[in-house]
Image (cartoon, rainbow, N blue to C red):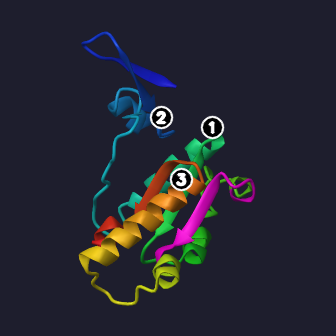
Amino acid sequence: MAEEVLASGRSRDRCITGIDALDNILDGGIPRGNTVLVTGSVGTGKTTLCMEFLVHGALEGENCLFISVTESCDKLMNNIIPYEFFEERLIKEGRLVFIDMPVIYAQLGLEELEFEMEEVDVLIDALSDIVTELQTKRLVIDSITSVC
């Protein structure tokens, strides 16, 4: 686990991404508790980068969750299986979980493309409950733009 020593003398844990060049740029990883927005054009590798981040966490014993908003998890799995960093056993062990957002919408009875604030609150509560239930340490929502 990487640590950063703050000016106050306290240390701040860093979440190692498992992507050496990125961890180097980030001085050891992402400061724990931070939210990171990964942006870029279609096909630039955002999903792959996020998957590698989750796989690394799962290999380190962390529970990781991928919520797919637009692409089905089955299709995503077919695309990600060939990568060298991917280990299917992590799914069987429950360390790496995939959920399709449309399934959550259906469970909550949300059918519209645009939600009222009350429905957004229900969705956020449901996502929070899933994260808590699974004891998730690393979460990827792909893509947050589609949720918005």
Q: Which of marks 2 and 3 is nearer the N terminus?
A: 2
Residue designated by label 1 = 60
State left or right for residue 114 relative to residue 28.
left
- Residue type at mark 1 is Glu
Q: Residue type at mark 3?
A: Thr
| Inter-mark Cα distance, 1 to 3 | 19 Å
Residue 51's x, y, as percent?
Answer: 51, 55
Residue visible at 55% across and 69% down in the picture = 99
Residue 61 at x, y percent in the picture:
65, 40
Residue in the image at 24% along x and 13% along y: 7
What kind of element bears circle 2? loop
Secondary structure beneath label 1: loop
Q: Which amino acid does label 2 sit on?
A: Ile
Q: Would you say the residues marked 2 and 3 are in contact, meaning their CB atoms lie under 8 Å apart?
A: no
Residue 95: say if magenta.
yes
Vertical arrangement, residue 22 with respect to residue 75, above or below = above
On screen, residue 34 above or below 129: above
The residue beneath circle 2 is 16
Q: Which span is picked out in magenta?
A: 91-101
Instruction: Give left or right: position of 93 versus 43.
Output: right
Mark 2 vs 1: CB contact within 8 A: yes
The percent position of residue 3, horizontal first and vertical second, equals: 43, 21
Q: Quadrant of residue 81?
A: bottom right
Mark 3: few/some/many CA within 10 Å (<14, 14-19, 20+): few
User: Which mark is on residue 132?
Assistant: 3
Does residue 45 appear in this view? no
Q: Which corner quadrant of the image does residue 141 belong to?
A: bottom left
Q: Is the residue marked by circle 1 packed among few (<14), some (14-19), or many (20+) residues within 10 Å?
A: few
Examine the structure image and report whether residue 118 is included in the region drawn in magenta: no
